[in-house]
Every structure is written in C-alpha cells, then in structure tokens.
Amino acid sequence: AALHFHFNGFSSQVLFGATGRRLPRTPAWLHPLHGIATVAAIAGLPVLAVGKALSLPVARILGVGATTLALIALSVTMSAVALRARSAATRTLLVAAAACGAAAAGLASAFGAGELAGQEWISLPTMLASHGLLMSLGFTVCGLVGHLRLLRE
C-alpha cells in the first residue's frame, strides 16, 4: 500500500499539473473542475492513509471518495486536452490514460466500499493485478508519454 500511495500519488500529481497547464479555455467549467479535483487528489491520499493506519472508517470513506472522484475528474480534463492534440498517437495515449484512470478509480471505489462493508467484492489479488496494471501502465505510462509528446507538438 505504501508503494502504491507514493507511486500513484506522485505520478497523478505530475499528470494533474501537466493537464492543468494545457486545459483549453472552453468549456469554461473545465478549469474549476480541474482545480477542485487537484485539491481533492492532494488531500485524499493522506486522509485515506490516516483512515487505514488508525482504522477510522469515516476517514477511509472520505479518502477513497476524494481520490477516486479526483481521478475521474482528471480523466475528464485529460480527455479535453487529448481532443486538442494534433497527433493521433498523442490523442490515443491521453485518451487511453484517461480511460484507464477512470476504470482504476471505479475498481478502487468498489474495493474500498466492499472492504468497509465487510465484504470481498473484489479479491486483493484481482485488485492488485487489475487496478495496478491500469494505474501503472495505462494511466501513468500512457499519460506521461502523451504529455511528453504534447511538448514536442
């Protein structure tokens, strides 16, 4: 869990920054959405970590909720950036990153809700394999490479 928090916490903040710098002016609601999501992403992981460390269900719910909603919002804003990319390869990488981020957020929500309900809706090995691959290869690698390609455009 510590490795996951550090790796995804760092890479998601890099992608939040890169996406925020390239957001189109229209539609106007993208900028407030991105700002709120950035704050939620910064706050969500520490709140979740405290909730896990101290067995505080309310903190865990707030942390999972903030983090997953922030990731879904980033997927929306990253898609808006992707649609403005000149290169089809860049668009594909950024849309793939956005889709993987949203899917990983859905899995994290389901896993967290099941854990809090005392149910195993998704097993830990399944979660590690699916969520881990979606976040590391799909979200992080595709997102970072896509944004690097944007620098060259």
Image (spheres, helix red, strand yellow):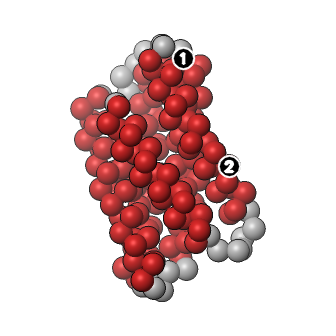
Q: In the rendered structure, which disc, 2 or 1, sits on the residue that comes first in sequence?
A: 2
> Is 111 displayed left or right of 141 in the figure?
right
Give SS at disc 1: helix
Residue position marked by numbered label 2 in the rendering: 36
Assess disc 1: are there few (<14), some (14-19) or many (≥20) residues with their C-alpha within 10 Å of its C-alpha.
some
Outermost residue to the right: 28
Quadrant of the drawing holding the N terminus: top left
Residue 67's disc is none
Could you say where residue 41 lies in the image, as x and y percent from the top left? 56, 44
Q: Position of residue 57 (x, y in %)?
A: 54, 17
Residue 145 in the image: state x and y as whole percent: 36, 69
Q: Between 148 and 80, which is closer to the camera in this rendering?
A: 148
Whether residue 147 appears in this view of the structure is yes
Residue pictured at 38% horizontal, 27% vertical: 121
Residue 69 at least partly seen: no
Numbered badge on residue 57: 1
* Amino acid at pointer 2: Ile
